[in-house]
Image (cartoon, rainbow, N blue to C red):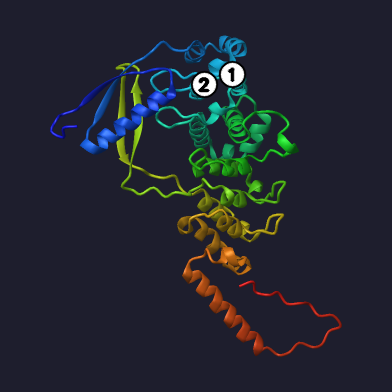
Amino acid sequence: QNPNTSLSRLRYYSTTHNDQHNNFAKLSSNLSSRYQLSLSIYITEMPLPLLYKLVFDEKWDSVLERVEAYPKEANEVGGAQGATPLYRASTIESSPLSVIKALLIANPTAAIQPDIGNITPLHELCESLENIFDGLTSTEKGNARSILEQNESHQLTKAWAKFSLLIEAAYFGSIASPLPGGRKWRILHTCVALDQFLVPPSTLKVVVKIYPEQLQEPNENGNLPLHLAAANPIVNQVEVPETDLAWDAYYSSMSGIMEFHFGPVKPHRNTIKFLVDTYPEAAAAPNRNNQLSLYVALDNDKIWDDTTKLIYMANPEAANSLPGELFQKLPNEIRELCSTQSKELGSAKKHETAPPLQSESTPSKKNKH
């Protein structure tokens, strides 16, 4: 409490409970921000849970036996990072798909359970998939889909299989087959329906490179990926000021030191921006309820700047089809522009030459505003 006191080191005895790690990290963040400290925390670890230790030692046959006999151990965290067995397995490239699947069956929520650094197994596999794809030759990138379908031993195929399982578990809460409701598996649609901090646009680029047709493919409800991103209340809903601080944790197994580093937050690139830039035509495509993505975004109270605005700019005409309550959510300048255009259109129609009489007339569309 004394600002003149030089506080440079704290001793912390870790437990196997993830909340304890998170609470301590928050405390460290507050101390560092308040007193401008650079903290190094010495970690004294408790004994590792057996399942976690077997994963750590890469004893895969034993892992399968253990998780089948004691599935609840898939919920326990271990190590200085406060990570689940699935997290640890996700960081090991040689981990068999059978192990990932067994751990997910025992604990499907582990797919998005973060460690004390707020990193999830899905984060790890996103990064792994991106790195593997980036390392492919131009020819291999062009044939990536064929590789997935025909070459089970390729590292891209192995990484993709793990990634797909975690996406399925993260969204549906299980890896049951077939999918609930008889749905067709569309990995791009599932990715964008998740929080963008789980599947960043850099990973979506890889997905689109392999399955580009899914950008234009509606799901069972007629929704394109842009509709789903617009409906997701999490995607880019809160803008983080650059002045805010966040912490990252780095652990050295050699020294036993956990260091928390603090700096400005850098939000992920906008998922909606990626979708609009990649396939802007989606902004003009209605879903089964005849709703455009602009309607969906406003109906779900998306922020305007850098989110809903991007959808509007891809198809400004969509504003004229909005019902009154959603039209009022548009910024004043957009509403005024729509009104001006509507008046100009009405004036132009008055000066048009009357068309010849026809046996049947088509009723004109009324402006809802």
* Mark 2 crowdedness (10 Å alpha carbons): few <14, some 14-19, many ≥20: many
Mark 1 element type:
helix
- Measured from the top left, where is residue 346 in percent x and y? 62, 83
The residue located at (57%, 63%) in the rendering is 326
Q: Amino acid at mark 2?
A: Ala
Mark 2 element type:
helix
Q: Amino acid at mark 1?
A: Val
Mark 2 vs 1, N-terminal side: 2
In the rendered structure, the answer to whether residue 217 lies left or right of residue 336 reads right
The residue located at (50%, 69%) in the rendering is 334
Q: Is residue 319 above or below residue 264?
A: below
Residue that carries the numbered disc 2 in the rendered image: 89
Q: CA distance from mark 2 to mark 1?
A: 8 Å
Residue that carries the numbered disc 1 in the rendered image: 99
The residue located at (58%, 23%) in the rendering is 107
Q: Could you say which is closer to the camera, residue 351 or residue 295?
A: 295
The C terminus sits in image quarter: bottom right
Do the residues bearing badges 2 and 1 touch, measured as CB atoms within 8 Å?
Answer: yes
* Mark 1 crowdedness (10 Å alpha carbons): few <14, some 14-19, many ≥20: many
**Residue 153 occupies which quadrant of the picture?**
top right
